Image: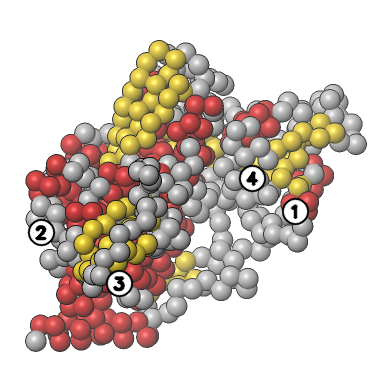
């Protein structure tokens, strides 16, 4: 008898969920909203600023070509290589800047922690798929572009359960 | 010719009754490992676990990277419990390098570890459900896990591989509205967790399959050196968080869940009850946490450890994880040895599966909280 009651209780708790909103995020149409503009780092205090660790953004006006990001990446993903750039900056005598291979990058963000000149941050852009391997290698010029993103859905919690939007 | 071949490779003596089955190495459910099972009809005669298919050499790799660069790859063995596997490493390195951790960072680390424990247990529960053919119990935890992933994503910036804990604190401070959001989602999750009781844990079908199967006695659990939920399900009150409190666990209010039965049902229920305790810890830590202050001690660029060695352990989702770190005046550790809960619980498998029905194998196997990638490191 207790078995029958147990099964009825289990079925009942399942049936209740027919009226509950679906939790599923309809991904390509809906995108989750993240905190801030991506992971950043303040070298003065040595503490990061919370944000999603997505694709990087490189500020050419701050990058001195010191290679610390590339050194930090050694032994982790080896995704960063320093390449020559066409533009000339007074503070970047060697004229080199990081180029990131997103086929290798693990998005740990330790390169951002290593940058002492506020030149390398991360952004909320995580959709980096491409048809070729070479398209995943982002040159300094590509890294300087601010990504266009529209992420606005948040988890909503009500009496009828949690749902996205 | 009497060459000694590895288990499972030798030519079997043909027996009319006994048949050998290879479960795995292609994913018996959790990761790549193989169980060589001998069955007599429907009953298991012997079981020989054969791990090692996903060995990555994490310990050797750690000898060639400095203390900070070790962080992203040391969390790889259990990516869905990444804060807990990094925790003892950070504690150990802090002791080696003599780093003081700010008070706020200690609380944040505890919150991250407990959120991550819930993520792990929900993942484990989802697979436990689908192992036993209960597809609702796969969908519900996998969906509710998203609540915690969302919180840790806001905290650390990554969904799964957080790389959030570092020697000296945490990578970044909490986002501005985190506390309110965390309390709201944890409160909803606790309500949700109670629904699991009816649909899964009080379900007569689950009870029929797991109660009384794979019994591990208290003395055997101690003798075999098991840890975590397997040990607590056999009636041993041992939790590293209580017995050797690290960071701020001694200030927080929680209980160790112990059950006496030692069967598969107890082993599956303990992690579930621990999630309630985790929620309690999170709420308590958010209340007691200093509201402002630094969260990370600034390190020297390439910190060196002295001529020293250290062993620190924490309680993870699968039991105690210990790190033994030796340094010899270099920026890289001389040796890193990881002692993981999964590997220590694996030894029970031949004992528990003997005499069990083949259909109950998944319930016993996954109830041991065994994660092959972590065990092989």
Q: Which mark is residue B261?
A: 2
Disc number placed over residue A133 in the picture, else none? 1
**Which numbered marker is on residue B84?**
none
Do labels 2 and 4 touch, CB within 8 Å? no
SS for tag 3? loop
* Residue A130 falls in image quadrant: bottom right
Q: CA distance from mark 3 to mark 2?
A: 20 Å
Q: How far apart are the two marked residues, 3 and 1, measured between alpha carbons?
A: 41 Å
Q: CA distance from mark 3 to mark 4?
A: 37 Å
Secondary structure of the residue carrying tag 4 is: loop
The chain carrying label 1 is A
Q: Chain of mark 3?
A: B
Q: Which mark is residue A105?
A: 4
User: Of the residues tagged 4 and 1, which is closer to the observer?
Assistant: 1
**Which numbered mark, 3 or 4, is in the foreground of this view?**
3
Q: What label sits on residue B132 in the rendered view?
A: 3
Q: Position of residue B333 (x, y in %)?
A: 46, 23
């Amino acid at each position: 008898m207790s078995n029958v009651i147990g099964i009825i209780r289990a079925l009942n708790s399942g049936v209740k969920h027919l009226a509950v909103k679906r939790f599923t995020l309809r991904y390509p149409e809906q995108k989750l909203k993240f905190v801030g503009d991506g992971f950043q780092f303040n070298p003065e205090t040595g503490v990061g600023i919370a944000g999603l660790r997505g694709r990087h953004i490189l500020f050419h006006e701050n990058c001195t070509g010191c290679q610390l990001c590339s050194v930090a990446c050694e032994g982790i993903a080896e995704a960063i290589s320093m390449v020559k750039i066409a533009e000339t900056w007074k503070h970047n005598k060697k004229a080199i800047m990081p180029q990131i291979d997103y086929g290798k990058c693990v998005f740990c963000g330790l390169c951002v922690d290593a940058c002492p000149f506020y030149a390398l941050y991360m952004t909320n852009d995580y959709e980096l798929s491409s048809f070729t391997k070479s398209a995943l290698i982002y040159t300094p010029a590509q890294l300087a572009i601010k990504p266009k993103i529209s992420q606005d859905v948040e988890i909503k919690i009500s009496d009828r359960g949690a749902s996205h939007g | 010719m009497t060459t000694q071949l590895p288990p499972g490779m030798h030519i079997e003596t043909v027996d009319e009754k006994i048949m050998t089955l290879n479960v795995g190495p292609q994913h018996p459910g959790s990761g790549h490992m193989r169980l060589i099972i001998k069955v007599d009809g429907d009953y298991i005669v012997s079981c020989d676990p054969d791990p090692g298919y996903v060995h990555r050499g994490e310990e050797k790799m750690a000898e060639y990277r400095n203390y900070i660069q070790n962080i992203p790859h040391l969390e790889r063995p259990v990516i869905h419990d990444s804060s807990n596997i990094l925790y003892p490493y950070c504690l150990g390195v802090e002791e080696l390098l003599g780093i003081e951790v700010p008070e706020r960072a200690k609380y944040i680390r505890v919150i991250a570890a407990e959120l991550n424990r819930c993520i792990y247990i929900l993942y484990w529960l989802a697979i436990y459900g689908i192992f036993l053919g209960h597809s609702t119990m796969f969908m519900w935890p996998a969906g509710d896990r998203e609540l915690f992933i969302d919180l840790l994503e806001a905290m650390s910036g990554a969904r799964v591989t957080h790389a959030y804990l570092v020697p000296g604190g945490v990578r970044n401070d909490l986002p501005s509205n985190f506390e309110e959001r965390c309390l709201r989602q944890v409160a909803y999750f606790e309500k949700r967790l109670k629904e699991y009781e009816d649909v899964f844990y009080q379900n007569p079908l689950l009870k029929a399959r797991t109660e009384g199967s794979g019994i591990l006695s208290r003395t055997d659990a101690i003798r075999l050196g098991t840890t975590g939920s397997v040990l607590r399900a056999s009636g041993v009150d041992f939790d590293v968080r209580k017995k050797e409190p690290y960071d701020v666990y001694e200030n927080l209010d929680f209980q160790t869940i112990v059950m006496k039965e030692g069967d598969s049902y107890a082993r599956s229920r303990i992690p579930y009850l621990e999630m309630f305790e985790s929620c309690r810890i999170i709420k308590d830590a958010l209340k007691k946490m200093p509201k402002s202050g630094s969260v990370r001690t600034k390190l020297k660029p390439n910190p060196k450890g002295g001529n020293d060695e250290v062993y620190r352990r924490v309680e993870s989702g699968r039991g105690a994880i210990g790190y033994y770190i030796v340094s010899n005046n270099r920026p890289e550790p001389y040796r890193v040895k990881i002692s993981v809960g999964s590997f220590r619980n694996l030894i029970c498998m031949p004992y528990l599966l003997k005499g069990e029905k083949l259909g109950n194998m998944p319930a016993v196997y996954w109830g041991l909280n065994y994660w092959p990638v972590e065990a092989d490191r």
